[in-house]
Amino acid sequence: MKKTILALLALVGVTAATAQNSNEWINLGFEVRADYQHELIDGKTVDANSGFKGKYFNVRLKGKITDQLYYDYRQRLNKPNKDATFFDATDWLHLTYKPTQNWEISAGKQVVAIGGFEYDKAPIDVYFASEYWHHINCYRWGVSGAYITPKGYDKVLAQIVTSPFDYINGNRKHSFAYNLMWMGQHDWFTSLYSVNFLEYQPGKFVQYLSLGNQFNWNNFCLQLDIMNRATLDDFTFFKNYTIVGDLSYMIKDRVNVFAKASYDVNNSQSGADLCVMPGTEMTRVGGGVEVYPLKDSHDLRLHVNGGYSFGKNSDPAGALQDNQAFFDLGVKWKVDVISAVQKVIKKK
């Protein structure tokens, strides 16, 4: 951690030296979230999940190398390095080559291309989530290629990455995931659809069909995710699946009121799904309010939310439990280092 902080301080120095040029080449930012939370199961406080918590501390660096070559990097400084390597806490670190406006190729650590809006949100913006969300390892090394339609409304991406289940309980399996994703934006409708084939053991696949739908009407936004999971030798619909709904209403771009519900169920007998265990049927409901006190800026956010989950989770270490209630109050802030340095230079 000390070496990481020293490296970041050096990077800030380099950024300050180049800030008078263009922030297209270096864009450096920090984002932090801190909360007070309280969790109860069967009316009893869960001490480990209650109290003041530093939830996230992220560093984001992105920009251009050339007019056709881009880089993007995000490091989560509060995330433990499970395998004692720096890259365990790296969310993504990849280069993207864009020879034309319609084609791009990326390589490095990437977000696994799985559809759905709950999955797509940055963890710092998720207050409570489905059982599936808590167990999927969504940042993996690999390559991807994408085609963007001439008007820019649709993007189709094909990706090969190390499987999210490649490293389980200390055992490396050398397995892969093959993903095809459509991202579309058409007036009031936005899509994040994917078909995924993920090896849970070498040569054995669990298949996802994940449909992320977003509908916008004036200040209302409804996100509806439907994910079906099945093995190739026993492909069925709605035996093992997750549904997530999130309805929000934005008031004058300053206050966002939302309600959210998720439902995870696995009635299959297969052990292929390593995110939602067989025999699980869990529901979670909740809601909250976000407030942006700065005018014309979302760099500072105050939030309060709460919820309740019920049902059966066959995973003793599962995130959602029966008769589980929670309350959360917190703050998130972002700092654009380039802009801040430029303002200091201009004042001088």
Image: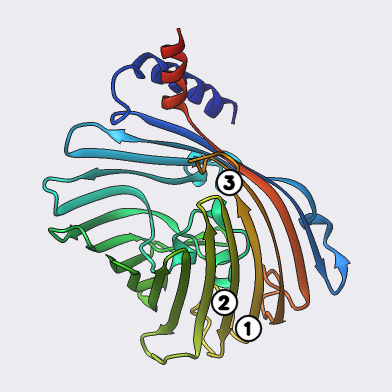
* Depth check, front residue: 35 or 288: 288
* Residue sitting at the far right: 44
Circles 3 and 1, Cβ within 8 Å, touching? The answer is no
- Image quarter for residue 117? bottom left
- Element on which disc 2 rests: loop
Q: CA gap, disc 3 to disc 1?
A: 37 Å
Circle on res. 280: 1
| Residue underneath mark 3 | 292
Q: Which mark is residue 325?
A: none
Question: Which is more toward the observer, 184 or 103?
Answer: 184
Residue at horizontal 40 percent and vertical 55 percent from the top: 140
Residue 274 visible in the displayed image: no
Task: Choose between 98 and 79: the one closer to the eye.
Answer: 98
Q: Determine which of the numbered discs, if any, sits on residue 276 in the image.
A: 2
Q: Position of residue 268 (x, y in %)?
A: 53, 90
Q: Amino acid at mark 2?
A: Val
Where residue 154 appears, as percent x and y from the top left, is 22, 64
Query: Disc 3 marks which amino acid?
Result: Tyr
Callout 1 environment at 10 Å: few (<14), some (14 to 19), or many (20+)? some
